[in-house]
Image (tube, rainbow, N blue to C red):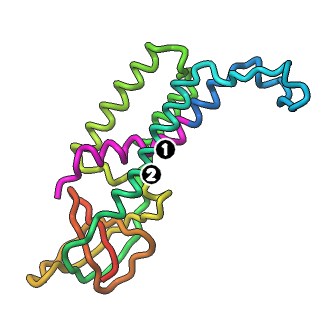
């Protein structure tokens, strides 16, 4: 089964919720960092615009949060279609380097007040998404770790034909040898208990 483009975009964008939160915090004006919080009795001296670009900052957080919620719904809806027998299981550390670069960029002067940098960053994210999606690596996503999924390398036999293979597997929770249910999406198997 091929991972649907819409679901892949949701998964990819949802993984950048922490980046949206970083940019939101960086959007608070310098002048506000030293001021005390407003008290109810002295509200006449308060500034209520806490963000320089509230629509962009809050919109990015809302959009990525919505993607996280929708990703959770989509991953729950995948029904493993066929039986497999798992013989050996080895946890695999997730490759986070593709997701680290954008966070490093956020601390190198990216802000909502510079549209040319935002446009360049958007091009970078689009290119990163295309590479990740086309290479079949979209499921190698740190967001899934946060949602309780774990990546494994597994030796298993498939179905009635008893075809043996070694494959990458994503499973929510711990994967133990024994009978499982699986669904192949691109080059990764999603597994659930039999």
Tell me which segment is drawn in magenta.
1-20
Position of residue 189 in the picture relative to residue 55 (left or right): left
Q: Helix, strand, or loop for circle 1?
A: helix
Position of residue 21 in the picture relative to residue 35 (left or right): left
Residue located at (46% from left, 58% from top): 145
Q: Are marks 2 and 1 in contact (CB under 8 Å)?
A: yes
Q: Is residue 7 magenta?
A: yes
Q: Quadrant of residue 6?
A: top left
Q: Which residue is mark 2?
A: 69
Place of residue 190 in the rendered image (x, y in percent of width and height, measured from the top left): 29, 66
Q: Quadrant of residue 98?
A: top left
Q: Quadrant of the N terminus?
A: bottom left
Position of residue 155 in the picture relative to residue 14 (left or right): left
Residue located at (39% from left, 20% from top): 120
Q: Is residue 29 above or below residue 37?
A: above
Q: Residues within 10 Å of mark 2 (few under 14, many from 20)?
A: few
Place of residue 122 in the rendered image (x, y in percent of width and height, measured from the top left): 38, 26
Q: Is residue 156 above or below residue 4?
A: below
Residue located at (28% from left, 64% from top): 78
Q: Residues within 10 Å of mark 1 (few under 14, many from 20)?
A: many
Q: Helix, strand, or loop for circle 2?
A: helix
Q: Is residue 120 above or below residue 125?
A: above
Q: Which residue is mark 1?
A: 65
Nearer to me, 90 or 106: 106
Residue that sits furthest to the right in the current view: 41
């Amino acid at each position: 089964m091929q991972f649907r483009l819409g679901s892949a975009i949701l998964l990819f964008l949802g993984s950048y919720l922490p980046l949206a939160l970083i940019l939101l915090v960086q959007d608070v004006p310098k002048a506000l960092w030293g001021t005390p919080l407003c008290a109810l009795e002295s509200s006449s001296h308060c500034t209520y615009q806490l963000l320089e670009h509230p629509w962009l900052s809050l919109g990015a957080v809302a959009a990525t949060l919505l993607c996280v919620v929708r990703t959770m719904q989509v991953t729950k809806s995948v029904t493993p279609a066929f039986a497999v027998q798992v013989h050996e299981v080895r946890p695999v550390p997730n490759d986070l380097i593709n997701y680290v670069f954008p966070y490093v960029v956020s601390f190198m002067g990216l802000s909502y007040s510079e549209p040319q940098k935002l446009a360049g960053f958007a091009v970078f994210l689009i290119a990163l998404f295309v590479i990740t999606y086309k290479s079949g690596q979209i499921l190698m996503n740190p967001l899934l770790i946060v949602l309780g999924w774990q990546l494994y390398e597994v030796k298993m036999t498939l179905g009635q034909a008893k075809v043996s293979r070694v494959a990458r597997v994503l499973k929510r929770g711990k994967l133990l040898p024994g009978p499982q249910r699986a669904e192949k999406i691109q080059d990764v198997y999603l597994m659930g208990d039999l």
